[in-house]
Amino acid sequence: MKFVYSPEYHADIGLHVFPTEKYDRIYKQLQREGLIKDGDVLFPERPSDEQLLRVVSREYLDDLVNYRLTARTYPSEMPVKKDIIDAQLLCCGGSHLAAITALEHGACFHNGGGFHHAFADHAEGFCYLNDVVFTAAMMIEHGIERIAVIDCDLHQGNGTAKFFHDEKRVFTFSMHQEHLYPAKQKSDLDIGLRNGVGDDEYLELLGGALEKIFGGFCPGFVIFLAGADPYVFDQLGSLRLTVDGLSKRDELVIGKAFEGDTPIIAVLAGGYAENVDDTVEIHCNTARVMAKRQKTRS
Ligand SMILES: [Zn+2]
């Protein structure tokens, strides 16, 4: 299975709920299992400023590349530091590289990305740059007409929803805990879940939404945010999905794309389990589902 990753994603952010060590741990675990081999791993490059300016304002990009603490970078809830901002710049290149790879190979796993709270003119919620927005915008340039963003992170993909609000070629779907950060934007389809929703209800609602999206919008490309934070032992949320339930979620989304031969990328997004092992396992499961599907098809 094709796998996009960079050791530079592991930035030192000090004491923080975001476990940046997850990237290396997922990579090593999947290597140990033989799921990814050396030839499968693709390393991203930082996009050019010209490319980035298609999705962020000049003022905001200047703040970012100069690592300046301003009203635009301050709301990130992350330190305004070179390593961290560079990692997210690189992640934009990573999701884009995954997308190009998926066009050729049908699917690609990006061991990073999903920074869906970043806006065109400011940071928010651990996110400086929205790699999902960047990738969808680049796919439009590649001539892909219908792109579906299937955002199953615990939190609403507010930055993505806002950016593509008037863009008919991108369908934004977010399924999230309703009474939680962030202030909501309007996606094309939102499912705001009450606290305490578990596997069965979640999977039923997701299945219905996927029917609507694949039956109505008929995507030519799918960007799947496979957040690990709807998990029952997540520190930031109150949904109650199990590790097994989250893997079934991945099976539903990735399976649906494979059934229709729709190229798909999966990106990690959030995950703040009390035990980082659980976050790593949930993300590895997404990769395992994708690899299994790809093996069955080939
Ligand atoms: Zn999240």
Image: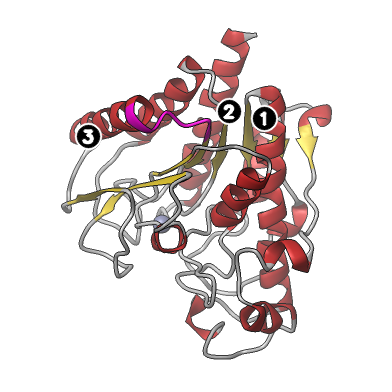
- Picture quadrant where residue 245 is located: top left
- Picture quadrant where residue 55 is located: bottom right
Does residue 81 lie above or below 278 as drawn? below
Q: Rounded to the nearest whole Å, what is the CA distance between mark 3 and mark 1? A: 28 Å
Residue mark closest to the camera, 3 vs 1: 1
SS class, disc 2:
loop
Q: Is mark 1 within 8 Å of ligand 1?
A: no
The x, y position of residue 263, in whole percent, is: 58, 28
Neighbours of disc 1 within 10 Å: few (<14), some (14-19), many (20+): some
The x, y position of residue 135, in whole percent, is: 61, 49
Query: Along the horizontal axis of the image, is 152 left or right of 5?
Result: left
The residue that mark 3 highlights is 205
Amino acid at the residue labelled 2: Pro
Indicate which disc residue 263 carries.
Answer: 2
SS class, disc 1:
helix
SS class, disc 3:
helix
Neighbours of disc 3 within 10 Å: few (<14), some (14-19), many (20+): few
Q: Is residue 113 visible?
A: no
User: Given the current orientation, which residue lies at the most extreme bottom position?
Assistant: 70
Region of the chain picked out in magenta, as a range: 216-221
- Picture quadrant where residue 250 is located: top left
Q: Is residue 252 magenta?
A: no
State yes or no: discs 1 and 2 in contact (Cβ < 8 Å).
yes
Residue at 77 percent of width and 29 percent of height? 40
